Amino acid sequence: MRALDLFIVLAYLAGVVAAGAWFSRRQRTTRQYFLGGRRVPWWAVSASIVATETSTVTFVSVPGIIFAAGGDFAFLQLVFGYLLGRLAISALLIPSYFRGELLTVYQLLQERFGAPVKALAASLFVVMRTVADGVRLLLTAFVLAAVWAAFSGAAAPETVVTAAVVVIGLVMIVFNFYGGMEAVIWIEVAQLAIYLVGALAAGIVLARKVPGGLEGALALGEAHGKLRLFHFELDWTRPFTFWSGLIGGCFLTMGTHGTDQYLVQRYLCTDSPAKARRALLTSGGVVLVQFVGFLTIGLLLYAFYRPFESGGTALAGDRVFPDFITRHLPSGLSGLVVAAIFAAAMSSSLNAIAATSVADLYRPLAPERSDAHYLRVSRGVTAAAGLAQIAVALAVRGSSRSALDSVLSVASLLNGPVLGVFLLGTVSRRAGGAAALAGMSAGLAVVLAARMLTPLAWPWYTVLGSATTLAIGGFVATFRSRPEKRPA
């Protein structure tokens, strides 16, 4: 990696901060800060959804899945579940987002079950997103550490990773603090374009460096069992089987894309359910294609580094693609790809955390304040949430787990009870606040017990949590002599 690459990376980071400052001119109300005035075009929202799923974790960790020992294309089974989940969201949930003026998706729970249920769901979201994005921030820091090692010619010590977490985290806070949701979406559109170009270019360079090119990598992959796609065995402990992928992936997507403010907030930036559906469904096709591409890059990395040989690399899966980007891509292209990875950290969940914290948790405690007051508090929460994510990244930097596995397992744990209470409100007219709270509490307890006491694979956590919430909530509701009145 040369000076040109470092200049591109620094220029991109400066450009991201400048974009946040430019968009700050429009952020005069909470509606503008959180929803972009509901004037964002559907195709930009669709690109934003894809870019959100194609985070630093995806860019770095998905190639590492197939690169690792025993890895293959089985991850795509989870993506098939993602597509099925999108269809369910379009049919069951999106219409309800546009009934009235919502700022967060959890306001629907207050209308149906009351304030305590809304507060619990909102709190679970804030915790889950803080932890998950802290892990994403750490992975971005690994990339910056690899950049430092390639530029300086010396191995990057842990102090470089720590410094990178702090620097990237502070840039992320500044960008989100000023730019609001509209800036996040448009930066994600640019990020996606750079991602696709950079990933394609990296794949082409890799194929040229591998003996026999892509055909040679495919032949090597077949010889080492890397090309297998479907695993139909009923093994509850494996994360990537056909059943855990299709069912678990569907429920996980219904949770992350249907009841998680991080992504629902993007739909609310459009002005109609039709546009929101178009954005969500279009993103599914793009996501499938690009996951195939990232796994193919992982196969090419396997053929390039040849870890199965005695002289092969000892790099962990999460670190092998950053190593190739910084050491083997041509000058200029390497800097562009690294800059795109950094951009993923800038488009974090800070704005969604602020929207949820202020609208669902703070505003009920401090009602009838001016909108300018809530906007100031929102920016303060944005900064506090960013500092919390920096703390999470520093706390887990010694973990040996795959970053993708860590992020998705956290999402699966906490999204299940929230999805379950949304489904309870859809299928049961009798269930009220008491039933919803009982169901969510039971769902959370059961899924945490499964995580700590059983070898159950994480794609089943959302299924277990939502099913338990629905079952217990429905059971409690049967003791009601009549449906509870919905709070006004």
Image (cartoon, helix red, strand yellow):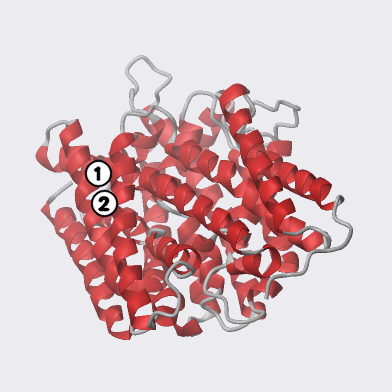
- Give the residue type at disc 1: Thr
Circle on res. 139: none
Q: Secondary structure at mark 2?
A: helix
The residue positioned 50% from the left and 83% from the top of the image is 38
Q: How many residues crowd around disc 1 within 10 Å: few (fewer than 14), some, or many (20 or more)?
A: many
Front in this rendered view, residue 317 or 477: 477
Residue 225 occupies quadrant: top right
Viewer-side residue, 44 vs 294: 44
Image location (x, y in percent) of residue 156: 17, 34
Q: Give me the residue at 33% from left, 63% from top.
A: 382
Label 2: how many Cα within 10 Å (few below 14, some 14–19, many 20+): many
Q: Which sits earlier in the primary sequence, circle 1 or circle 2?
A: 1
**Position of the C terminus by quadrant:** bottom right
Residue topped by disc 1: 326
Cβ atoms under marks 1 and 2 closer than 8 Å: yes
Q: Give the secondary structure at mark 1.
A: helix
Alpha carbon distance from label 1 to label 2: 6 Å
Amino acid found under the numbered disc labelled 2: Ser
Viewer-nearest residue: 2 or 74? 74
Left or right side of 445 for 266 = left
Q: Would you place residue 309 above or below residue 193 in this image?
A: above
Determine if residue 300 is in view.
no
Residue 440 at what x, y percent from top left? 66, 47
Residue at image x 42%, y 71%? 366
Residue corresponding to mark 2: 334
| Residue for point 31% across, 66% down | 176
- Judged left or right of residue 170, residue 112 is right
Where is residue 392, by image quadrant? top left
